[in-house]
Amino acid sequence: MLDTIAEGSNWAVINKPAGIATERHFQYDTVEARAQEQWKRPSAKKPAYVGIVHRLDRPVSGALLLARNKSTLVALNEAFAARRITKVYWAVTDKPLPAVTGDLVHYLGREPTRKKAFASTRPVAGAQEAKLSYRLLAGSGNSYLYQVVPITGRFHQIRCQLAAAGAPITGDHAYGSLRPLGDHVIGLHARQLNFTDPKSGEAIEVTAPTPEYWPVATEQP
Protein backbone atom coordinates (compact mmCIF):
# COMPACT_ATOMS: atom_id res chain seq x y z
CA MET A 1 0.00 0.00 0.00
CA LEU A 2 1.11 3.53 -0.75
CA ASP A 3 1.08 6.06 2.07
CA THR A 4 -1.14 8.87 0.75
CA ILE A 5 -0.39 12.08 2.68
CA ALA A 6 -2.56 14.52 0.68
CA GLU A 7 -5.06 14.27 -2.14
CA GLY A 8 -7.47 16.27 -4.27
CA SER A 9 -10.18 15.16 -6.66
CA ASN A 10 -7.69 14.50 -9.47
CA TRP A 11 -4.30 14.14 -7.80
CA ALA A 12 -2.56 12.52 -4.82
CA VAL A 13 0.73 13.01 -3.01
CA ILE A 14 2.25 9.83 -1.59
CA ASN A 15 5.20 9.43 0.75
CA LYS A 16 7.38 7.26 -1.49
CA PRO A 17 9.46 4.65 0.32
CA ALA A 18 13.12 4.36 -0.65
CA GLY A 19 14.06 1.22 -2.52
CA ILE A 20 11.39 1.18 -5.23
CA ALA A 21 11.36 2.94 -8.58
CA THR A 22 8.74 5.51 -9.55
CA GLU A 23 7.67 4.26 -12.99
CA ARG A 24 6.34 0.82 -13.80
CA HIS A 25 9.04 -1.51 -15.13
CA PHE A 26 8.10 -5.07 -16.10
CA GLN A 27 6.90 -6.86 -12.94
CA TYR A 28 9.07 -4.97 -10.45
CA ASP A 29 7.59 -3.30 -7.39
CA THR A 30 7.13 0.37 -8.30
CA VAL A 31 5.05 3.34 -7.22
CA GLU A 32 3.13 3.29 -10.50
CA ALA A 33 2.28 -0.41 -10.20
CA ARG A 34 1.13 0.00 -6.61
CA ALA A 35 -1.01 3.03 -7.48
CA GLN A 36 -2.63 1.27 -10.43
CA GLU A 37 -3.68 -1.56 -8.15
CA GLN A 38 -4.63 0.65 -5.20
CA TRP A 39 -6.76 3.05 -7.27
CA LYS A 40 -8.45 0.38 -9.39
CA ARG A 41 -12.22 0.29 -8.99
CA PRO A 42 -13.62 -3.10 -7.96
CA SER A 43 -15.61 -3.55 -11.20
CA ALA A 44 -12.94 -2.13 -13.54
CA LYS A 45 -11.27 -4.41 -16.09
CA LYS A 46 -8.34 -2.11 -16.77
CA PRO A 47 -5.72 -0.71 -14.34
CA ALA A 48 -6.43 2.73 -12.89
CA TYR A 49 -4.90 5.73 -14.65
CA VAL A 50 -1.71 6.92 -12.93
CA GLY A 51 0.04 10.02 -14.27
CA ILE A 52 3.70 10.41 -13.32
CA VAL A 53 4.11 14.15 -12.74
CA HIS A 54 7.75 13.95 -11.61
CA ARG A 55 10.16 11.27 -10.46
CA LEU A 56 12.23 10.36 -7.44
CA ASP A 57 15.25 8.10 -7.82
CA ARG A 58 14.85 4.56 -6.52
CA PRO A 59 16.89 5.12 -3.31
CA VAL A 60 15.16 8.44 -2.52
CA SER A 61 12.08 8.75 -0.30
CA GLY A 62 9.46 11.45 0.17
CA ALA A 63 6.66 13.49 -1.38
CA LEU A 64 5.71 12.34 -4.87
CA LEU A 65 2.86 13.92 -6.83
CA LEU A 66 0.66 11.69 -9.02
CA ALA A 67 -2.17 12.66 -11.34
CA ARG A 68 -5.43 10.70 -11.56
CA ASN A 69 -6.32 11.75 -15.12
CA LYS A 70 -4.65 12.99 -18.30
CA SER A 71 -5.79 16.63 -18.12
CA THR A 72 -4.44 16.98 -14.58
CA LEU A 73 -1.14 15.41 -15.64
CA VAL A 74 -0.81 17.92 -18.49
CA ALA A 75 -1.61 20.87 -16.19
CA LEU A 76 0.86 19.75 -13.52
CA ASN A 77 3.58 19.02 -16.09
CA GLU A 78 3.14 22.55 -17.43
CA ALA A 79 3.38 23.93 -13.89
CA PHE A 80 6.64 22.04 -13.37
CA ALA A 81 8.05 23.31 -16.66
CA ALA A 82 7.16 26.88 -15.65
CA ARG A 83 8.73 26.32 -12.20
CA ARG A 84 5.47 27.00 -10.41
CA ILE A 85 5.94 23.86 -8.32
CA THR A 86 8.52 23.98 -5.54
CA LYS A 87 10.30 20.97 -4.07
CA VAL A 88 12.27 21.07 -0.82
CA TYR A 89 14.55 18.18 0.11
CA TRP A 90 16.29 17.05 3.27
CA ALA A 91 19.68 15.45 2.86
CA VAL A 92 21.83 13.66 5.41
CA THR A 93 25.52 13.88 4.50
CA ASP A 94 28.70 12.26 5.80
CA LYS A 95 30.59 15.55 5.87
CA PRO A 96 29.69 19.25 6.11
CA LEU A 97 29.25 21.56 3.14
CA PRO A 98 31.53 24.63 2.81
CA ALA A 99 29.18 26.96 4.75
CA VAL A 100 26.12 26.88 6.98
CA THR A 101 24.07 28.26 4.11
CA GLY A 102 24.86 28.88 0.48
CA ASP A 103 24.41 28.04 -3.18
CA LEU A 104 26.07 25.46 -5.40
CA VAL A 105 26.53 25.95 -9.12
CA HIS A 106 27.97 23.24 -11.36
CA TYR A 107 27.70 21.99 -14.91
CA LEU A 108 26.28 18.47 -14.89
CA GLY A 109 26.56 15.82 -17.55
CA ARG A 110 26.03 12.08 -17.68
CA GLU A 111 28.83 9.55 -17.68
CA PRO A 112 29.10 7.13 -20.64
CA THR A 113 27.30 4.42 -18.65
CA ARG A 114 24.34 6.86 -18.27
CA LYS A 115 23.91 5.65 -14.68
CA LYS A 116 25.77 8.53 -13.00
CA ALA A 117 26.20 12.25 -13.40
CA PHE A 118 29.45 14.19 -13.29
CA ALA A 119 29.97 17.76 -12.12
CA SER A 120 32.28 20.44 -13.46
CA THR A 121 32.85 23.97 -12.20
CA ARG A 122 33.27 25.11 -15.81
CA PRO A 123 31.11 24.64 -18.91
CA VAL A 124 31.86 21.40 -20.75
CA ALA A 125 30.37 19.81 -23.85
CA GLY A 126 27.12 18.03 -23.12
CA ALA A 127 26.75 19.44 -19.60
CA GLN A 128 23.96 21.71 -18.33
CA GLU A 129 24.12 24.34 -15.62
CA ALA A 130 22.75 23.14 -12.28
CA LYS A 131 21.91 25.33 -9.28
CA LEU A 132 20.69 24.63 -5.77
CA SER A 133 20.57 26.37 -2.41
CA TYR A 134 21.20 24.72 0.95
CA ARG A 135 20.93 25.41 4.66
CA LEU A 136 22.30 23.42 7.60
CA LEU A 137 19.52 22.29 9.96
CA ALA A 138 21.38 20.04 12.41
CA GLY A 139 24.30 17.68 12.86
CA SER A 140 27.90 17.20 13.90
CA GLY A 141 30.66 14.63 13.65
CA ASN A 142 29.89 12.49 10.61
CA SER A 143 26.17 13.21 10.17
CA TYR A 144 24.73 16.51 8.91
CA LEU A 145 21.18 17.41 7.96
CA TYR A 146 20.62 19.99 5.23
CA GLN A 147 17.59 21.56 3.65
CA VAL A 148 18.16 21.65 -0.10
CA VAL A 149 16.12 23.51 -2.71
CA PRO A 150 16.99 22.67 -6.33
CA ILE A 151 16.64 25.67 -8.63
CA THR A 152 17.12 23.55 -11.75
CA GLY A 153 16.09 19.95 -12.29
CA ARG A 154 18.96 17.82 -13.57
CA PHE A 155 19.67 14.10 -13.51
CA HIS A 156 20.98 13.13 -10.02
CA GLN A 157 21.47 16.84 -9.36
CA ILE A 158 21.42 16.94 -5.55
CA ARG A 159 23.37 13.70 -5.20
CA CYS A 160 26.08 14.79 -7.62
CA GLN A 161 26.37 18.42 -6.51
CA LEU A 162 26.63 17.68 -2.78
CA ALA A 163 29.27 15.03 -3.47
CA ALA A 164 31.20 17.43 -5.72
CA ALA A 165 31.16 19.96 -2.85
CA GLY A 166 32.72 17.39 -0.51
CA ALA A 167 29.56 16.21 1.29
CA PRO A 168 28.29 12.92 -0.19
CA ILE A 169 24.82 11.86 0.86
CA THR A 170 24.90 9.09 3.44
CA GLY A 171 24.49 5.66 1.87
CA ASP A 172 25.07 6.98 -1.66
CA HIS A 173 28.03 4.78 -2.53
CA ALA A 174 27.79 5.73 -6.22
CA TYR A 175 28.81 9.28 -5.27
CA GLY A 176 31.42 8.55 -2.64
CA SER A 177 29.66 7.80 0.67
CA LEU A 178 31.44 5.18 2.76
CA ARG A 179 28.63 4.82 5.29
CA PRO A 180 25.89 2.20 4.84
CA LEU A 181 22.23 3.11 5.29
CA GLY A 182 20.36 0.19 3.72
CA ASP A 183 19.86 -1.68 0.45
CA HIS A 184 18.94 0.81 -2.28
CA VAL A 185 18.50 3.53 0.34
CA ILE A 186 20.23 6.90 0.67
CA GLY A 187 19.75 9.86 3.02
CA LEU A 188 17.80 12.01 0.58
CA HIS A 189 14.13 12.77 1.25
CA ALA A 190 11.66 14.95 -0.67
CA ARG A 191 10.44 16.79 2.41
CA GLN A 192 8.01 19.38 1.03
CA LEU A 193 6.00 20.00 -2.11
CA ASN A 194 4.19 23.25 -2.96
CA PHE A 195 1.84 23.55 -5.92
CA THR A 196 -1.57 24.83 -7.03
CA ASP A 197 -4.52 22.47 -7.44
CA PRO A 198 -5.29 22.69 -11.21
CA LYS A 199 -9.03 22.33 -10.61
CA SER A 200 -9.73 24.45 -7.53
CA GLY A 201 -6.83 26.92 -7.72
CA GLU A 202 -6.05 26.21 -4.06
CA ALA A 203 -2.44 26.56 -2.88
CA ILE A 204 -1.26 23.16 -1.63
CA GLU A 205 1.67 22.57 0.73
CA VAL A 206 2.52 18.98 1.64
CA THR A 207 5.16 17.81 4.13
CA ALA A 208 6.35 14.20 4.09
CA PRO A 209 7.53 12.67 7.40
CA THR A 210 11.11 11.40 7.36
CA PRO A 211 11.80 7.64 7.38
CA GLU A 212 12.37 5.85 10.67
CA TYR A 213 15.86 4.74 9.66
CA TRP A 214 17.30 8.28 9.45
CA PRO A 215 20.27 8.89 11.77
CA VAL A 216 19.24 9.91 15.31
CA ALA A 217 21.72 12.78 15.33
CA THR A 218 19.69 14.56 12.67
CA GLU A 219 16.19 14.05 14.01
CA GLN A 220 13.79 16.88 13.21
CA PRO A 221 10.07 17.28 13.99
Image: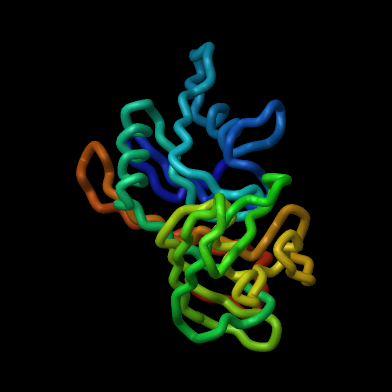
Instruction: Let me know if residue 85 appears in the view.
Output: yes
The image position of residue 85, as x and y in percent, is: 34, 52
Tell me if 173 is positioned left or right of 106 in this view. right
Closest to the observer: 63 or 5?
Answer: 63
Tell me if 19 is positioned left or right of 219 in this view. right
The image position of residue 87, as x and y in percent, is: 42, 58
Instruction: Let me know if residue 61 appears in the view.
Output: no
Above or below, comparing residue 157 to residue 50 in the picture: below
Quadrant placement of the N terminus: top right
Quarter of the image holding residue 24?
A: top right
* Residue at 50% from the left image edge and 80% from the top image edge: 137
The image position of residue 71, as x and y in percent, is: 32, 28
Closest to the observer: 52 or 46?
Answer: 52
* Residue at 36% from the left image edge and 57% from the top image edge: 86
Is the image coloured rainbow, by chain, by secondary structure, or in one colour? rainbow
Which residue appears farthest toward the left when viewing the image?
A: 201
Tell me if 172 is positioned left or right of 193 in this view. right
Tell me if 137 is positioned left or right of 67 in this view. right
* Residue at 38% from the left image edge and 38% from the top image edge: 11
Quarter of the image holding residue 131?
A: bottom left
Above or below, comparing residue 103 to residue 140 in the picture: above
Closest to the observer: 204 or 127?
Answer: 127
* Residue at 45% from the left image edge and 79% from the top image edge: 102
The image position of residue 125, as x and y in percent, is: 56, 53
**Label total for image:** 0
Above or below, comparing residue 110 to residue 47 in the picture: below
